[in-house]
Image: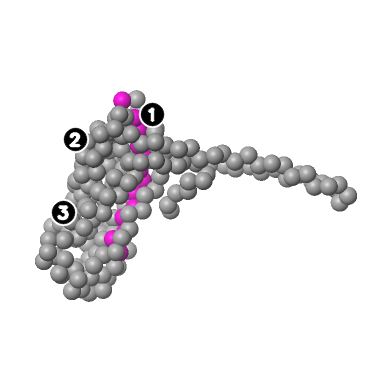
Amino acid sequence: MKHLKYIALATLVTGLSACSTVDIVSRNTAFQGTPVATAAPQQIVRDYRVQSVRFAVPEDLTVSEANSYYPIADIVWRGDPLGDRGAQIAEIFETSIDGAGAALDGATPVTVDVVLARFHSLTERTRYSVGGTHSIKFDLTVRHARTGAVLEPTRRVVADFPALGGSAAMAAEGAGQTQKVRIISRLTSLFQHELSGVSETGPAAGTDA
């Protein structure tokens, strides 16, 4: 993976509808159950080579710079100097996917679409007291890099993991394990998992909410 494009993606919401039928049987008639067809999950054997990544931060995500214990916002980030938080988070994802992609040398060239849903790290007050959780969620779609065909439909990926606090946070900081370093390590490992190996899609696979 050579580069990452930090762009705004249009969101397409497809409405889904379901219908059901009810069989009415008489009191004296034996019930005849109708077999319900269930779609078997499909296996995806990943043999990817990441050629590009399209990353987007939707405009409706809220950002907070309040130094409270738990700001009510979608984006809370203090691991970089005050600035464009969307661009800073894009750089984190770029570094992470670049690291994961270095180990992927498969036959299928892919484009990875990432749309941020939440990036809620710790404020200064929380980091140097109680700690908490790095809450990171995004939507991931895998497409063929040449044809644009969807190889893996959009799914929600939850990357939450514990965030250090108090003396543990200060000790980690002194050892070079900043919030940014730990988050990049977590995301790199996660993308390696999400883009390699064998996966199942379909009703039996399930998705993270």
Type of the residue with mark 3: Gly
Name the residue at 25% across, 34% down.
105
Q: Is residue 80 left or right of residue 144?
A: left
Rendered position, 77 above or below 138: below
N-terminal of the pair, mark 3 or mark 1, is 3
- Which range of residues does the magenta coloring cover? 133-146
User: Does the residue at mark 2 contact the one at mark 3 (Cβ under 8 Å)?
Assistant: no
| Label 1 sits on residue | 149
Name the image colouring.
Answer: one colour
Q: Residue 192: horizontal and vertical position, in percent?
A: 29, 45
Is residue 165 in view? yes
| Label 2 sits on residue | 2
| Label 3 sits on residue | 83
Type of the residue with mark 1: Ala
Name the residue at 43% across, 53% down.
209
Name the residue at 78% across, 44% down.
32
Q: Residue 134: horizontal and vertical position, in percent?
A: 28, 61
Q: Which SS type dominates the magenta stretch?
A: strand
State which quadrant residue 49 falls in.
top left
Please, what secondary structure does the residue beneath circle 1 have? loop
Name the residue at 23% across, 67% down.
164
Please, what secondary structure does the residue beneath circle 2 have? loop
Is residue 5 in view? no
N-terminal of the pair, mark 2 or mark 1, is 2
**Label 1 crowd (10 A; few <14 / some 14-19 / many >=20):** few
- Whether 132 is among the magenta residues is no
